[in-house]
Amino acid sequence: MRVLPPELTLHSAATWEGVPARIAYGIGRLRQEVFVVEQECAYLDLDGRDLDAGAVQFWAQGARGEVAATLRVLPEDHQELGLRSIGRVATASAWRGRGVAAALLDAALAECAGHPVLIHAQSYLTEWYAGFGFVTSGPEFLEDAIPHTPMRRG
């Protein structure tokens, strides 16, 4: 399992209510900074899925309480019994290239142990996700004008 830089700590919450208010704000802000502003994708990030029973939030937090990276694990039993998905993977620009997202993904995959996992990877990241055992599971598609590739592990 990969480790975070020493300035960060790994956290998770099995319910949205278990995420401290300032951290929930930081998670939302980071997701907006990355997806809405940086990637220019106008969409409703707060889609209700964070509140799903079985949704787990992960984040890396700095000493001052800032959210350096985040992702979420969602149950996808409506598609296939036991199926999980990982999404909303976002890392603050100051922390990119330092293994933060990889450490969060390792923790999320540990949470999903024994379950198949889906991810809709931005296509330029398919090789990175392949390093975690994901394989392409369908044709590339556009989501918010960004090429994505469905991938599956297990």
Image (cartoon, helix red, strand yellow):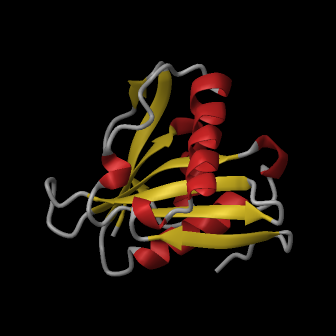
**Seen from this angle, which residue lies furthest front?**
21
Q: Is residue 75 above or below residue 29?
A: below
Q: Residue at (61%, 61%) from the top-left corner?
A: 59
Q: Is residue 100 above or below residue 97?
A: below
Horizontal and vertical percent for residue 91? 68, 48
Count of numbered circles in the view: 0
Horizontal and vertical percent for residue 74? 34, 58
Res 137 seen here: no
Q: Residue at (75%, 60%) from the top-left corner?
A: 65
Relative placement, left or right, of 95 versus 152 is: right
Q: Is residue 97 above or below residue 103?
A: above
Residue 64, quarter of picture? bottom right
Nearer the observer, 10 or 66: 66
Horizontal and vertical percent for residue 32? 59, 33
Q: Residue at (57%, 26%) from the top-left corner?
A: 36
Nearer the observer, 30 or 84: 30
Relative placement, left or right, of 34 versus 115 is: right
Residue 30, quarter of picture? top right
Horizontal and vertical percent for residue 116? 30, 68
Q: Residue at (42%, 59%) from the top-left corner?
A: 16
**In the picture, which quadrant includes the C terminus?**
bottom left
Relative placement, left or right, of 118 versus 132 is: left
Relative placement, left or right, of 97 versus 26 is: right
**In the picture, which quadrant includes the N terminus?**
bottom right
Nearer the observer, 146 or 46: 46
Res 22 seen here: yes
